[in-house]
Image (spheres, rainbow, N blue to C red):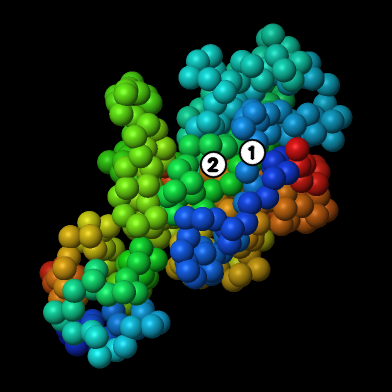
Amino acid sequence: MALLSIKNIALKGIASCVPKKVEDNSSLKVFKGDEAEKFSASTGIYRRRVAEKDSTTSDLCYHAAEKILESLYWEKESVECLIFVTQTPDYILPATSCILQDRLGLSVETYTLDISLGCSGWVYGLATISQIMSASGMKRGLLLVGDTITKFCSKDDKSSYPLFGDAGTATAFEYLEGSEFKIHTATDGSGYRAIIIPEGGYREVVNESSLNKINYEEGITRNGVELALNGLDVFVFGISKVPQSVNLLLDKIGVERDKVDYFLFHQANMFMNEKIRKKLKLIPEQVPYSLENFGNTSSATIPLTMTVKIREQLEKEKLKLIACGFGVGLSWATVYFETDGIVCPELIEI
Amino acid sequence: MTLQDFVANFAAQFDETDVSAFNPETKFHDLDEWSSLLALSIIAMVDDEYDFKLKGNDIRDSVTIEDIFKIVNAAS
């Protein structure tokens, strides 16, 4: 069982960036009759941010990274490690973290790495960067996490497109004696088809028929290089594994659930997230949501929710936090950590 | 767990369909109100009431309400 205790690395700041363009779910043509209204009432998702055609995840993360570096007064040369977590990289190759090292003006001595994870990505990225820093003695690191899922969702697929928004985030880590992350990580690859873009990789390469639209049922039409989401299987996964993981970590660290200030869950949809909250017996005040205005932004949901919902508390108060990411893979991870006044600038819009 | 209670719990997830439409032989996929969101409600209801996790395929492959009842009953 992967229960990690990572010492002497602390989270110092978070910045989030979203595209300016807002898309209202009530305006989508894929919904018929009162479907949009019902969809939003049950998922809690009313509008989302959508990246322009010429804007990528790395653009959003770049602006978030510049902002957090500036807000922390960090010299660029002082950043020794850059990890980029996304499933929407700029290119199949090279790794986007290399491009970001140069674009951000970081030293050529920077340790860079791309990680391909979605909804669990922020917690896995946090686990990875903090372990690397803790083991190596690196003093400062940047974790850039985000996705532009709207780019590979079919607009004619009501089972996926209306759920997703785009966002990029930057989380800053620094060596600090006495600090600690406690993390549970897990994987169940038997569910790999539950959330998948079937074609375009090297198992099923792009071919002449990849762009053919297939109608699966009313309101669900997509091609082979667009996202296929099996909502039922993901739901069953979420309502069982997330409470298990959070309970396991709470038991391990010996902290009572009512002593945790905020539980930051991946923002999947309100129906699933509220089930999870109730199963864990958490009060609504402990569980902030950013679904209404941003939808599911994949790996960015947890830092984005921190920026738009608890920014002031993060800046001013001493907090005990639990964050849990879960989804594509299937992959899930939960972290417990404490903050004491981190830097959290206002949401950036580009 | 009785079949009658199960059908009542199943029916309670629906807002618009008249309760008289529900019996063990009801082909739930054919109901006008049936949707993927209702499928989630059924999974959640079974999780809450019977402490059992239906799989997506259990819902997809079942035809009648009794088919689902049998899956849940077999496990308890």
In front here: B30 or A304? B30
For residue A72, which numbered disc appears in the image? Answer: none
Q: Is A128 positioned to the left or the right of A61 in the image?
A: left
Residue drawn at (41%, 40%) of the image: A227
* Picture quarter with the N terminus of chain A: top left
- The answer to which quarter of the image holds residue A212 is top left
Residue drawn at (53%, 20%) of the image: A91
For label 2, the crowd category at 10 Å Cα-Cα, with few meaning under 14, some 14 to 19 and many 20 or more, is many
Residue A63 placement (x, y as % from top left) = 75, 31
Which residue is identified by label 2? A150
Q: Residue type at mark 1: give it.
A: Ala
Q: Is B50 positioned to the left or the right of A225 in the image?
A: left
Q: Is A30 positioned to the left or the right of A293 in the image?
A: left
Residue A105 placement (x, y as % from top left) = 76, 16
Q: Is residue A183 above or below residue A258?
A: above
Chain bearing tag 1 is A
Q: Are marks 1 and 2 in contact (CB under 8 Å)?
A: yes
For residue A51, which numbered disc appears in the image? Answer: 1
Q: Residue type at mark 2: give it.
A: Thr
Residue drawn at (32%, 23%) of the image: A207
Point out the residue furthest to the top here: A108
- The answer to which quarter of the image holds residue A179 is top right
